[in-house]
Image (spheres, grey):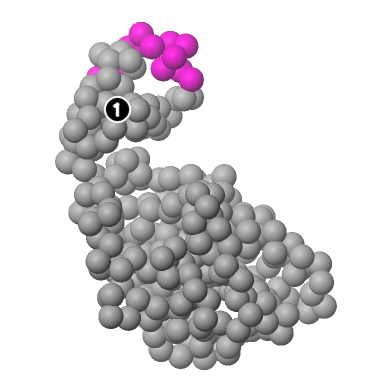
Amino acid sequence: MTLKEHINAIADAVGQLYPAEEAHAIAVRTVTGLLSVPDYKYLSEPDTVVEPDKALLLEDAALRLSKGEPMQYVLGYTWFAGLRIRVAPGVLIPRPETEQLYELAAQDCDNLMTASEDDSFNILDICTGSGCLACAFASEFPEAHVYACDISEAALRIACRQKVRLQGARPVFFKADVMLPPPAGLPRFDLIVSNPPYVRESERAQMRPNVLDWEPAEALFVSDDDPLVFYRAIALWADRLLKENGSLWLEINENLAPETAALFTGAAVIKDINGKDRFIVVKK
């Protein structure tokens, strides 16, 4: 089969799960990603014959995708802030909103570093998941010391195995439960970021099966009875660990922006790329 035929076959396989345009985009990204060929090749050389061993790989991918498995898990990676980030079942797939969180916090980080008079500049990523935020900061700010924590051992295994080329030191990943006090021995931080679980159980119906059936529920959902539980815990961590003049950046539930902001003194709510109340920044 040719490149074009494989793309059409995968698009057909997922056609019942996604709109036609999205199904085609998934097929193109899957084929070009697994074959390690440029995205444009399916347009410039659509009749290129795929070698038998590679064809088997694509057929297996089509089967997995047809069952609803996310494309990023099938590929084994996703792109985040220009970095190829390893993902697999057991870790949340980074969203565009989280990439915007990084972009906003990175701009702030530039200003904080310029103004800082300390010998060391420290960044903490709470609920790190795949480690995408931590790796992005470590890549962009090689002079910073980046720490990142999660309670999930599965997520930490993936985070620790990220193969991102860095000019400076790799992030320090450690296991921690944000519901408990911060572990002893941590430094104070100039910048703290977090994308904790914030989707209420009652909001499950709004999510696609490829998310509900595959991505870790513990990284997504919180009880309707106490949907801000992680933010209250993070507020306590920030109170203990954030330096004077430091910044705290959080991704939040768009439907709970006022309630979340009320947990922090002087919090400002910022909209995401879709105009939704998605982020909070707190200046200490």
Q: Is residue 180 something that shows in the picture?
A: yes
At x 28%, y 62%, the residue is 203
Position in image of residue 188 (x %, y %): 64, 84
Q: Is residue 159 something that shows in the picture?
A: no
Q: Please say if 195 is above or below 63.
A: below
At x 42%, y 82%, the residue is 178
Front position in the image: 231 or 58: 231
Identify the magenta region.
Answer: 40-55
- Residue to which mark 1 is pinned: 20
At x 29%, y 32%, the residue is 19
Quarter assignment of residue 271: bottom right
Callout 1: helix, strand or loop?
A: helix
How many numbered badges does the structure rendering display? 1
Position in image of residue 43 (x %, y %): 44, 14
From the image, which quarter does the N terminus lie in?
A: top left
Q: Amino acid at mark 1?
A: Ala
